[in-house]
Amino acid sequence: MSITNQDVQHVAKLARLNFTPEEEQMLTEQLNAILQYAEKLNELDTDGVEPTTHVLHLSNVMREDEAKDSLPIEKVMANAPEEEDGQFKVPAVLD
């Protein structure tokens, strides 16, 4: 498979991009180089290789939930710019 200048022009039109003829030629060459490199992957023998979703083993590290005492309201409100009745006071965003 190879990319032509017409392919680049078509995609550029869809993306509403304007390229000079020199830029179109450069992009055509670069995209073809990428495709040639990707074709090398077809040369690999992948028989018996399990498909993976990620190259590294991922696992969630989770701790057990523990009930703990909450912070005292005085500590929570210590750095609040404004407070009212033990709650943060913020400017109204609706009329």
Image (cartoon, helix red, strand yellow):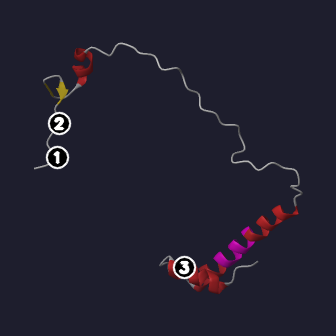
Q: Earlier in the sequence, mark 1 or mark 3?
A: 3
User: Gap in Å between the C-alphas at discs 1 and 3?
Assistant: 42 Å
Q: Position of residue 22 (x, y in %)?
A: 62, 82
Left or right placement of residue 36 versus residue 24 in this view:
right
Q: Amino acid at mark 1?
A: Val
Asked whether 64 falls inside the magenta stretch, the response is no
- Tell me the residue that label 1 is attached to: 93
What amino acid is found at the position of numbered circle 3 in the picture?
Answer: Ala
Q: Secondary structure at mark 1?
A: loop
Depth check, mark 1 against mark 3: the one in front is: 1
- The label shown at residue 12 is 3
Q: Counting other residues with Cα less than 10 Å from the Cα at mark 3, is it few (<14), some (14-19), or many (20 or more)? A: some
Q: Nearer the viewer, residue 14 or 87?
A: 87
- How many numbered marks appear? 3
Q: Which residues are magenta?
A: 27-34
Which residue is painted at 51% across and 79% down in the image?
Answer: 14
Q: Position of residue 82 (x, y in %)?
A: 16, 28
Q: CA distance from mark 2 to mark 1?
A: 9 Å
Q: Secondary structure at mark 3?
A: helix
Q: Quadrant of residue 67?
A: top left
| Quarter of image, res 3 | bottom right
